[in-house]
Amino acid sequence: MLSHIVAVIPLVAGSYGAYLEQRQATTTSSSTSVPQYFQTSPEIYAGPTPTGRAPFLAESNPAPFGTSRSFVANTPLETALPIAGDTTNSSIFHLMGQLSPYFPNPRASGFGVNEYPLPPGANITLVNTLHRHGSRYPTTNASAEKFGKTLTGLIHAGTVNFTGALSFLNTWSYQLGDEILVPVGRQELFDSGVLHYYDYGHLYNTSTKIIARTTTQDRMLKSAEYFMAGFFGLEWTNNATLEVIIEQPNFNNSLAGYFQCNNSNLPVATGGTNASIIWEKDYLQNATARFNAITSGINWNTSTVYA
């Protein structure tokens, strides 16, 4: 469920869509105390700056997905620690459930549906992008944070002990933040902006500034800004206006539907959570038994193993 939407970004084909105009800032730095050689805007002696023709891969690429696609995802998260029992050279960061950073669907068919090139005679004239925020820290008071802090307290009190594969927990402490983007989340939105430019840059009408929309929560606002930086470059404010909508009760916010729908936070809307609990009790039974076998002072259950 897209419970937090970052931005709605419209791009429409026009007669000026062939080139992305790199507009120069019209104002100078407000600080006169910073030496010129530390200032980056406006650019001084920038050299030649003409740009090339805007790409349009979404229309011209004959096969976005498929077994022969030439695509390698960026992987800034790496570890040399092996996964016990793994024989396929998997990434541990792909096995973290809902905490895994974004990675392309391993199936050749993309998001579980077949991808086809545009039929002859068809063309793309309008794109509206509805985007989720990037990878972030856990929600305040979510199960991961609650259990992490509880476990940290037990470890510091010396009332629990771990052996074997969990022995690292004897000196572990919970050190995550709350809700804001993590570094890889910033990269995800920047990379998405770059991808959208390559796919749809041709639609951008350089005679106008587009209007994008986002909400006031920090991770949503930053996600929209990083997306814009990926699409337009660091000077994106010369090409787009970002409308920031207050994300609080009693404000009209079409990007935060849970504040507009009376049923959103009632039991009728918790089907996904209920289904997850049922699945946790099924697939985590063996893991829970393994954890309890090498732990003393705390009794693991499927909920705490999941957290």
Image (cartoon, rainbow, N blue to C red):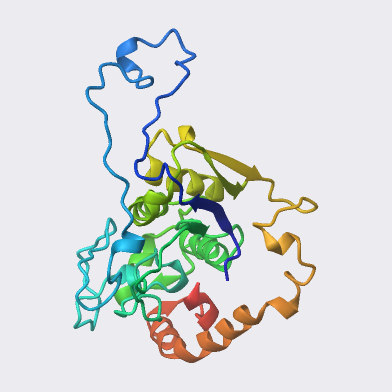
Is residue 47 left or right of 200 when viewed as pictured? left
Asked where in the image residue 80 lies, by quadrant, the reply is bottom left
Asked where in the image residue 102 lies, by quadrant, the reply is bottom left
Closer to the camera, 75 or 176? 75
Task: Give above or below for 220 relative to 297.
Answer: above
Closer to the camera, 87 or 173? 87
Task: Give above or below for 254 relative to 299.
Answer: above
Q: Residue at 49% across / 58% down in the picture?
A: 127
Provide residue 72's location: percent of width, then percent of height: 23, 64
Is residue 194 left or right of 75 when viewed as pictured? right
Q: Residue at 69% across / 62% down in the picture?
A: 257
Provide residue 70's location: percent of width, then percent of height: 20, 67
Check the picture and name the quadrant holding the N terminus: bottom right
Task: Give above or below for 140 relative to 166.
Answer: above
Q: Residue at 54% across / 61% down in the picture?
A: 145
Provide residue 233's location: percent of width, then percent of height: 37, 39
Closer to the camera, 285 or 86? 86
Q: Residue at 38% across / 66% down in the picture?
A: 169
